[in-house]
Amino acid sequence: MMYIEQLYTKCLSEAAYYIESNGEAAIVDPIRETEPYVEMAAARGARIKYIFETHFHADFVSGHLDLAQTTGAQIIYGPNARPAYDVHVAEDGEELRLGALTIKVVHTPGHTPESTCYLLRDENGKDHALFSGDTLFVGAVGRPDLAVKSERPLTPEMLADMMYDSLRNKIMPLADEVIVYPAHGAGSSCGKGIGKETWSTIGVQKATNYALQPMTRAAFIAEVTQDLPAPPAYFFEDARINMQGYERLSEVLGRNVRGLSPEEVAARDDEVLVLDTRHPNEFERGFIPGAWSIGLNGSYAVWVGTLIPIDRPILVVAAPGKEEEAIVRLARVGYENVVGYLQGGMESWATAGQPVDAVKSVTAREMLDALPAPLLDVRKPGEFAVGHVPEATTFPLSNLEQRAGELDPETTYYVHCAGGYRSMIAASMLKAHGIPQVINVLGGIKTIREAGAALQAEEAVSA
């Protein structure tokens, strides 16, 4: 019997996998919380035998070490992996038994030198599914610029050259009906142009994936290395953590999940960043002066990793009952320097008579009526180029902090994004950086379009 389940973590656009046969289970690319895997195996009466890692992940801290310590399962990496802890480094082509199934190690360097896919064969030895990690996505392939720095520096072009061979010699010869189970879906920064589906087949990918179309090696290298956006700053730190090892999550939470009184929060060190994880609609009505809004309802961990240095002390503000979730999701991406959370949330802060700031929000119609007031579009440059308000200035959120000094503290700025999540992050950051007159546009470009604005398409022009 064969059982496969995809466990998708939306905020990371990450897919882990549970595979089971005859009471033996394997986990592919687990996230840091191990309970879902342990509980699933226990409920199904199975024992976790293997933990397969497709590579040293850059976008999250893997749960492989905690899971191995909890279950006794063996961690498997492919060739070229040299972690600082005990694992089985498999050879290319090596086969491992899982109940009645066989899992073949398929070394596919390119995304990183150790990148490896795992080919699952059924009870009859027929190829059934490829767990492709960050080598092959739906509609895309892994970016070749995220390898951990080593004694042998590898350029993106060198890794792309490896990927050309991996795709054409190892993956494309597989039968069309073989299922492709990638490690990421749309929204991940581990590849460009990843499709919205979270699985596919070899045949469909050969027909539709741009990187699998006929082209020369030189053309392939040029295609996969061009127009790569800068990776979030935390990526290389997470890859290093996954290579070197880390503290158990239970120990991290025991230290970080700590309630602080309003008085303790008010007396915090200046280096401590107040991270308000409530919904933007709640944040705008009242928040601790200087706090940044990055809500749990969006790509929370990714934006934290993009905007906040991994070693900066963080103090969490959360909706009641969401404090531990906010801190766990920080730990998923290696953010463990949390000094605690505001006990009782913003209600306790206000009751204690502490100062409260707010953000004014307006409708798209009100914003359009206020033009030519300065309008900052904090979407990505590519989004801006597709269609924007003609009077808007592109001011991407990812480098907003570096550019905040370009703005005039005496000027009122309107800020919008695609739907309202990023614009509230931007408004909070600008206020924290001494730009007090920031107005958020509710609903972003969607509502601006609905209000009848004539959008302009062109190349993005920065301020």
Image (spheres, rainbow, N blue to C red):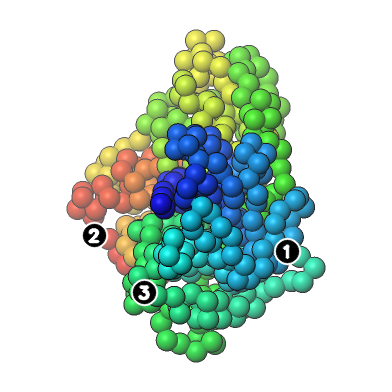
The residue carrying pointer 1 sits among few (fewer than 14), some (14 to 19) or many (20 or more) residues within 10 Å by Cα, namely few
Mark nearer the viewer, 2 or 3: 3
Which residue is denoted by mark 1 in the rendering? 149
Left or right, 372 with reference to 132: left
For numbered disc 3, what is the local secondary structure?
A: loop
In the image, 114 versus 277, the foreground residue is: 114
For numbered disc 1, what is the local secondary structure?
A: loop
CB atoms at circles 1 and 3 under 8 Å apart?
Answer: no
Residue 283, position as x, y percentages in the image? 43, 29
Type of amino acid under label 2 = Ala
For numbered disc 2, what is the local secondary structure?
A: loop
Spatial distance from mark 2 to mark 1, Cα to Cα? 47 Å
Q: Earlier in the sequence, mark 2 or mark 3?
A: 3
Type of amino acid under label 1 = Lys
The residue carrying pointer 3 sits among few (fewer than 14), some (14 to 19) or many (20 or more) residues within 10 Å by Cα, namely some
Spatial distance from mark 2 to mark 3, Cα to Cα? 45 Å
Residue 2, position as x, y percentages in the image? 41, 53
Which residue is denoted by mark 3 in the rendering? 176
Type of amino acid under label 3 = Asp
Which residue is denoted by mark 2 in the rendering? 454
Is residue 288 something one can see in this rendering?
yes
